[in-house]
Image: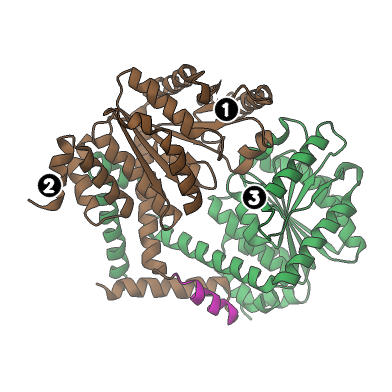
Chain colours: A brown, B green
Amino acid sequence: MSEVRDLAARFRAGHKAALARAISWAENGDPSYPEFLRSVYASVGRAWRTGITGPPGAGKSTLVNELAKNLRARDRTVGILAVDPSSPISGGALLGDRIRMEERTSDAGVYIRSMASRGGHGGLSRASSDACDVIDAFGIDEVLLETVGVGQAEYDVVSATDTVVVVLCPGAGDGIQAMKAGILEVADVLVVNKVDLPGSDRLLMDLEESAHIRHAGTGRWIPPVVGCSAGKSQGIDEVLAAMDSHRDHLRATGLAAVRAAKRVAQVQRVLHERLAVQLWGAGGQGERVRALLEAGRTPYDVVDELAEHFTSALRSRA
Amino acid sequence: MSEVRDLAARFRAGHKAALARAISWAENGDPSYPEFLRSVYASVGRAWRTGITGPPGAGKSTLVNELAKNLRARDRTVGILAVDPSSPISGGALLGDRIRMEERTSDAGVYIRSMASRGGHGGLSRASSDACDVIDAFGIDEVLLETVGVGQAEYDVVSATDTVVVVLCPGAGDGIQAMKAGILEVADVLVVNKVDLPGSDRLLMDLEESAHIRHAGTGRWIPPVVGCSAGKSQGIDEVLAAMDSHRDHLRATGLAAVRAAKRVAQVQRVLHERLAVQLWGAGGQGERVRALLEAGRTPYDVVDELAEHFTSALRSRA
């Protein structure tokens, strides 16, 4: 029996070690992963995927822990994927946060996995989306994908999940922390955590206003704004209720079409990445571009030359 | 004499009609543009390029008008390029704003051009960057590129200009309007316009705090935060002084390297665009991806199939 078929068999039999192995394949871009995915792909699509994102310090891990607890009380199995796109240092901090979550790992209905950044951003995006597929195929009911909302990461959350929960907290420059990048743009549910801190009323109000300005009259989903205090286990039911309302909305308005569109975008992204690697190579063509520009070529002439170089390289492989 | 050489000759002789024509070539992606650019490219790089961006309603056009007036008082020639990435409707509104600027057009030292969105975002990005090159090659001292800071547009401003001025104003949800996308990330100078409105002190403070949190200890440029009231011609000197300080900083720390890096990134972007068109074609391969996914293929299998399709298509042209 091949390694892939062996893993797929143990995976289908529900062994968590096989799940862990399969996620590692996805994470590392193992050459066996595509074949493995093919063998379990018919099982993908049954889980509900929720992304939890927001700036550092908003209390995402604590909220995820509380959400998992509440989902377990509803008899839903839960897979938690915590992705940290930043440095090894905050990777360590994140793993520290995870220690508090270990109380859940004794529960067979919960699977927790941290994923640190290796290589470029595109790689992490692909890896986290693939890991969601794997957890989904394993038969887990609820996937919670936790990411730090900085830079482009939040758009990856959208493409990998069905519902995006954006978590903010008052203080530390109030709304300024949320300005970092369009994390409000991607929210299906807006959560103000640590709602007992000063400034939370203002933040809740600002978010309500912003959500209505952005979406009123568009016929689009208006993200509900919910306050909670995850550290005190308060307001978690309200967060879940808001998540449920978005899930109901999607199911009523065409979940399959939304998911299909996200898959198409995912394929286009992966294909672009692959062609970019073919084009630029491991080291990149940056030096070559620079040299041509320094020699006085116009950007258009450089593009022409490199495009020709690229197509010749492909032809020579024929 | 060919059309291109004829235009280049009139362009070098300083005819504004030739400048306008060349920008139209850049804007429309005319097949003659690359040859024209080649013929004047040695003159590119002498202008200073300032991007002015911010949310709608911040008063960008008024500020640009005031900056132009003050730069003219310094005997600098000014080219204004106003780019509107949004719908034809707001394109109209923008042209309305421009009417107030007509007072400047009787001054031979000022050139004003509006550019509305046609086709995709990538096209507008390329067109506005090219138009800056053309104005620069014409021998104008100062290029002011005005864009609405929404979505990805602000990153285009960075790649097309030397100094980025982000304009905000108090009220209307205060900082919330700035949350729309990471427009703070790209600021070299932060301007609070309409500084006589209530809430401006708080906004100035929030921006100061945010700028310091983001950059303190990194050794990087910390964007100065300046208040002004463009509508009352107040504080414009302070905005110009902040722009000058950034210009001095860049010249002291290696302007050539920064500009070269931006050019390299520009070439890579244009090349990606061209290959994407080759790959997806005019209509896009979205339907094909969708059909393959609906037939139950995994995303990886679809990528394999399309990558093979793409390389075969290139080979067959050999």
Relative to residue A217, is residue A171 drawn left or right?
right
Within the image, what quadrant is residue B181 found in?
top right
Q: Nearer the viewer, residue A151 or B80?
A: A151
Q: Nearer the viewer, mark 3 or mark 1?
A: 3
Residue located at (86% from left, 66% from top):
B76
Q: Amino acid at mark 1?
A: His
Confirm whether the magenta stretch covers residue A292: yes
Q: Which residue is mark 2?
A: A6
**SS under mark 3:** loop
Quadrant of res B80: bottom right
Residue A25 placement (x, y as % from top left):
27, 51
Name the side, left or right, on which A108 lies relative to A257: left
Q: Is residue B24 visible?
A: no
Residue marked by disc 3: B185
Does label 1 lie on the same chain as label 2? yes
Q: Whole-Å distance between the Cαs marked 2 and 3? A: 49 Å
**Position in image of residue A74 (x %, y %):** 33, 17
Quarter of the picture containing the C terminus of chain A is bottom left
In this view of the protein, can residue A126 be seen by the observer?
yes
Circles 2 and 3, Cβ within 8 Å, touching? The answer is no
Magenta-tinted stretch = A284-295
User: Is B311 a magenta residue?
Assistant: no
Location of residue A255 in the rendering, given as x and y in whole percent from the top left corner: 36, 28
Q: Which chain does tag 1 point to?
A: A
Residue designated by label 1: A215
